[in-house]
Amino acid sequence: MTLTVALSLWVGGLVALTLVAAPVIFRTAGSRHLAGAIFGSLLRTFGWVEIALGVIAAIALSVQIATTSSLSTGDWLRMAGLALMIVLLFISTFAISPAMHELRPKCGSFDSAPAGPGEIDARLQFDTLHRWSERVVGTIMIAGLAVLTLTVLRRP
């Protein structure tokens, strides 16, 4: 039960942020620069929530596995999926997000054309990191849905 709740909150939070909050913030904030600052702050804060949920999920899955007499293919897949989620979460939280946060001031305003070569280079780097961030979050969501599905199907 704890594993299902932790995974549901983790995946549900990511879905709510990326599919609901982001479009609303970018549509209503008044500028891309402000919207990016708001949404970036939300993602950094939620990253810590994700870490807590990842720890809870890992403990819950470990307890489930420890009380199982033999591991099924589904158990191995759940362990691999959760491990992938946690590795990607740490890459996102401790590598991609800080790099984007550091580059952000060097990009100038996203509401106007770059002022010079320095801003152009910073924006290109930022855009590359942003694409990686989207891929990582998408993979975490897909893996989370898979682990959640396998967990629910495992129940008697």
Image (cartoon, grey):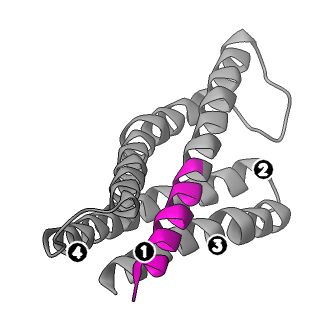
Residue 31's image quarter?
A: bottom right
The three-letter amino acid code for the residue at tag 2 is: Arg
Question: Disc 4 vs disc 3: which is toward the camera?
Answer: 4
User: In the image, is residue 2 above or below residue 32?
Assistant: below
Mark 4–mark 3 distance (CA, rounded to whole Å): 28 Å
2 vs 4, front mark = 4
Give the CA separation, mark 1 to mark 4.
10 Å
Q: Earlier in the sequence, mark 3 or mark 1?
A: 3
Mark toward the viewer: 3 or 1: 1
Q: Residues within 10 Å of mark 1 (few under 14, many from 20)?
A: some
Residue 21 point in image, percent of width and height: 69, 70
| Residue indicated by mark 4 | 64
User: Closer to the camera: disc 2 or disc 3?
Assistant: 3
Q: Residue at x 40, y 47 (%)?
A: 84
Three-letter code, disc 1: Thr
C-alpha gap between disc 2 and disc 1: 39 Å
Lower sequence index among marks 1 and 4: 4
Query: Is residue 97 found left or right of 78 in the rendered image?
Result: right
> Residue 32 shows which numbered tag?
2
Q: Neighbour class for label 2 at 10 Å: few (<14), some, many (≥20)?
A: some
Helix, strand or loop at mark 4: helix
| Residue 6, visible in the rendered structure | yes
Could you give the CA–CA distance between mark 2 and mark 4, rounded to whole angstroms? 45 Å
When asked about the image quadrant of residue 29, the answer is bottom right
Q: Quadrant of the C terminus?
A: bottom left
Dots 2, 4 in contact, CB < 8 A: no
Q: Which residue does the image show at 41% across and 49% down from the upper left?
A: 89
